[in-house]
Image (spheres, helix red, strand yellow):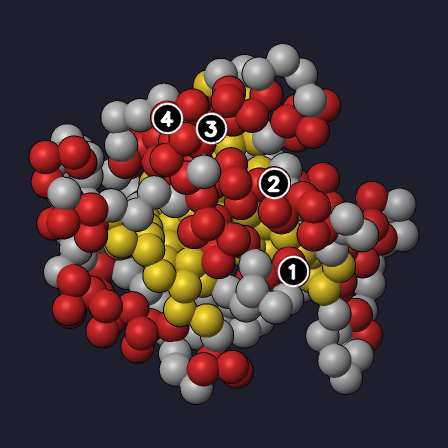
């Protein structure tokens, strides 16, 4: 069976439903839908090892925020997106404790720059709390770091983050990364939040060491935006939708270099959504209004 690549638990569930018998039941997985600030939210909970094996994702909760209507620029669209994302994050993150926000990815490669660009909008407060406790005493300590990629640093992301965790001793880690989707309609139009950690590069077949509680010793939450679609996965979906019938997986994967597809205006979309992610993290971590965040970041 052709293995379609995706980082989204929502799509992994869709793929199972497409391949299963009509009467088949998906054990170990629970799903539901809701709306937040006008944006649809899909919740997929992988409850046990059976569900994890079936969907190919670790046990945990996966929330997918659909921001398709964000790009229609309706009233208060940015603030509503920040509140929706921040509210969902707040439900998953611990209510107190120090946070370490990690920006994964390659800043020099636009579709992979979500993590580093998000950090530009994250309020970093750890040093302020120690240096000016009277002025900033009511804020949660937050540190942020962009770890780069193995090809430019020679250091695995997991190695760098383990060192930071050992020195800073945060209560939890939030990892921000670019993801891969199976659908072009979800590229730069969805945000996935999970409490099960992350495996950088898994959606495009470039698996690195996992960042999770087992490897770091503290809870790891992941926030990601799909910015690319695997070309072979896209071709397979288009063939199925056109009614072309069966196709040759080896032929679809036969190119010497794997290919991914991304929107032509990916630079503008990634920069804007990274700002949404940064403000959403601030909303979840601090008791601040969006105007206050803008003033402190300015």
Residue identified by numbered label 2 = 272
Residue identified by numbered label 1 = 110
Q: Quick check: 186 left or right of 262?
A: left
Q: Secondary structure at mark 1?
A: helix
Q: Can you tell which quarter of the image residue 132 is in?
A: top left
**Residue 163 on image: x %, y %:** 22, 73
82 lies above or below 233: above
Which residue is nearer to you in this view: 33 or 50? 33
Query: Which is more foreground, mark 4 or mark 3?
Result: 4
Distance in Å between CA atoms under marks 4 and 1: 29 Å
Residue identified by numbered label 3 = 82
- Give whichever of discs 4 and 3 has the lower sequence position: 3
**Residue 156 on image: x %, y %:** 39, 78
Quick one: label 4, few (<14), some, or many (20+) residues within 10 Å? few
* Callout 4–callout 1 Cβ contact below 8 Å: no
Quick one: label 2, few (<14), some, or many (20+) residues within 10 Å? some
The circle drawn on residue 292 is 4
Query: Which is more foreground, mark 2 or mark 4?
Result: 4
- Give whichever of discs 2 and 1 has the lower sequence position: 1
Distance in Å between CA atoms under marks 4 and 3: 13 Å
Q: Secondary structure at mark 3?
A: helix
């Amino acid at each position: 069976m052709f293995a379609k690549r995706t980082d989204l638990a929502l799509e992994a569930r869709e793929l199972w439903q497409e391949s299963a018998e009509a009467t088949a039941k998906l054990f170990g997985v629970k799903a539901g839908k809701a709306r937040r600030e006008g944006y649809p939210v899909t919740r997929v909970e992988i409850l046990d090892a059976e569900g994890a094996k079936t969907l190919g994702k670790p046990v945990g909760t996966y929330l997918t925020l659909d921001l398709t209507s964000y790009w229609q620029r309706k009233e208060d669209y940015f603030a509503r997106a920040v509140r929706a994302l921040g509210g969902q994050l707040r439900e998953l993150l611990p209510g107190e404790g120090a946070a370490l926000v990690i920006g994964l990815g390659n800043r020099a490669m636009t579709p992979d720059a979500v993590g580093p660009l998000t950090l530009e909008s994250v309020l970093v407060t750890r040093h302020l709390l120690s240096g000016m406790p009277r002025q900033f005493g009511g804020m949660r300590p937050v540190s942020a770091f962009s770890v780069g990629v193995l090809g430019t640093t020679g250091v695995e992301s997991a190695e760098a983050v383990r060192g930071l965790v050992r020195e800073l001793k945060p209560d939890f880690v939030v990892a921000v990364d670019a993801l891969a989707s199976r659908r072009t309609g979800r590229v730069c139009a969805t945000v996935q939040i999970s409490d099960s950690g992350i495996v950088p590069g898994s959606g495009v077949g470039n698996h690195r060491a996992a960042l999770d509680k087992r490897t770091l010793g503290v809870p790891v939450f992941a926030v990601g935006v799909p910015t690319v679609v695997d070309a072979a996965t896209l071709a397979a979906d288009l063939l199925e939708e056109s009614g072309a019938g069966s196709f040759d997986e080896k032929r679809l994967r036969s190119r010497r270099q794997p290919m991914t597809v991304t929107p032509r205006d990916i630079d503008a979309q990634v920069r804007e959504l990274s700002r949404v992610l940064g403000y959403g993290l601030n909303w979840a971590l601090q008791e601040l209004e969006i105007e206050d965040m803008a003033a402190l970041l300015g």
